[in-house]
Image: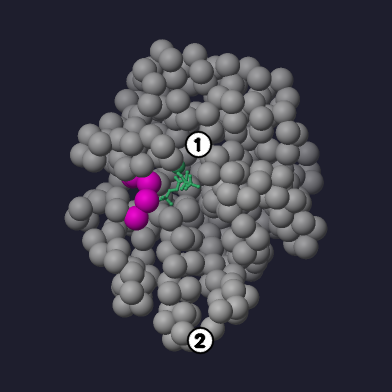
Amino acid sequence: MIVTTAQLFKHAYGKYAVGAYNINNAEQAMGLFKGCISSKAPFIIQISKGARKYTDKKMLEAIIRSADEIFPEAIFAVHLDHGDEETCYDCINSGFYSSVMIDASHESFAENVAISKRVVDAAHKKGISVEAELGKLGGVEEDIKVEEGHACLTDPAEAAAFVQQTGCDSLACAIGTSHGAFKFKGKQSLHFDVLQKIKNLLPNYPLVMHGSSSVPQDEVARINAAGGTIAGSMGVDVNEYLPAAKLGVTKINIDTDGRLVWTRVHREFFRDKPAEFDFRPPGKIFIEEYAKFIASRNVLLGSANQLDDLRKSLGNK
Ligand code: G3H
Ligand code: 13P
Ligand code: ZN
């Protein structure tokens, strides 16, 4: 069942974070639904601009509608990840998306406010909620490059003013994470001090954490042992997901880790079976491995086993 992102946030706020997982194809969709059903977790499907172009935006929509029929127990929202203004309007007008993200974080504060507010006004007319972003994550945000070492954390006072001026429904904050597999040079923690200040100024307001893959080191080691060259990659400490959720982070974005599962499965498969050239055998392994990975993340986010209670609270409306 597709619900609004707002409904998911209302149930999760202060207790757990909803996992927001990117999909690009049917195999990822199958693994995601299977993992969320087995762990009894609500979830958010994220679709990036790149994913919409990879096959076709209509293809992804059809895959999600079919998955909804195949897994009638699932409760989830559909979200545009890192949208520009034009893509936001396309998703708002499509009637399919539960929410959109307008990412104008690379603009000045005033321009970010102006763009985000235009999107909020258009989205709210159609009952769709909007995630906006303030502050800059390190690493690569689609085509937006932020120089390493110059990641700029969200200023709490600015965050409060931004929400007030735009009317956005949730805010992606920069609190020390970055996109991709190379987040930190050494061990590093989230900036809980900044998060606490944002929460104090925006009580009961859903915050979003991008760049939250954990880049499991055993996964990286297996990929490298099977011919990969991603040494030195490092991600977020999974033990920091729940403490962040208790401080108002209601949506945690995980994409890179799923790509690592895909890479490990396929590298190992073709290393061990060099004469194979059928995509279905490794595809099936990927679906099962991705489902296991998703279920494990939902446990760490606290969203596992929330499905029945959420269903009850939605029914009681
Ligand atoms: O933050 C970006 C997401 O990981 C999506 O990545 O733009 O390559 O689909 P993508
Ligand atoms: P990761 O690269 O850490 O998976 O972050 C994904 C993300 O933020 C998608 O918007
Ligand atoms: Zn992101």
Query: Residue at 48% of width from left, 21% of height from top?
Result: 163
Which is nearer the eye, 250 or 176? 176
Which type of secondary structure does the marked residue at label 2 adopt? loop
Instruction: Specify the quadrant that holds the C terminus.
Output: top right
Indicate the amino acid at tag 1: His
Name the residue carrying label 2: 275
Q: Mark 1 points at which residue?
A: 82
Q: What residue is shown at x 37% (from left), y 58% (from top)? A: 214
Numbered mark located on residue 55 in the image: none
Q: In which quarter of the image is residue 314?
A: top right
Amino acid type, residue under disc 2 in the picture = Ala
Name above or below for residue 117 compared with residue 71.
Answer: above
Q: Position of residue 249 (x, y in %)?
A: 46, 41
Reply yes or no: does residue 179 show up in magenta. Answer: yes
Which quadrant contains ligand 3? Answer: top left
Tell which of 183 and 308 is nearer to you.
183
Quick one: label 1 or label 2, which is nearer the N terminus? 1
Tell me where residue 110 appears, x and y as whole percent: 41, 13
Which mark lies nearer to you, 1 or 2? 2
The answer to whether the residue bearing label 1 lies less than 8 angstroms from the nearest atom of ligand 1 is: yes
Q: Which contiguous range is marked in magenta?
A: 177-181
Chief secondary structure of the magenta portion: loop
Do labels 1 and 2 touch, CB within 8 Å?
no
**Label 1 vs label 2: CA separation?**
40 Å
Q: Residue at x 58, y 49 (%)?
A: 54
Determine whether, in the image, residue 212 is placed left or right of residue 186: right
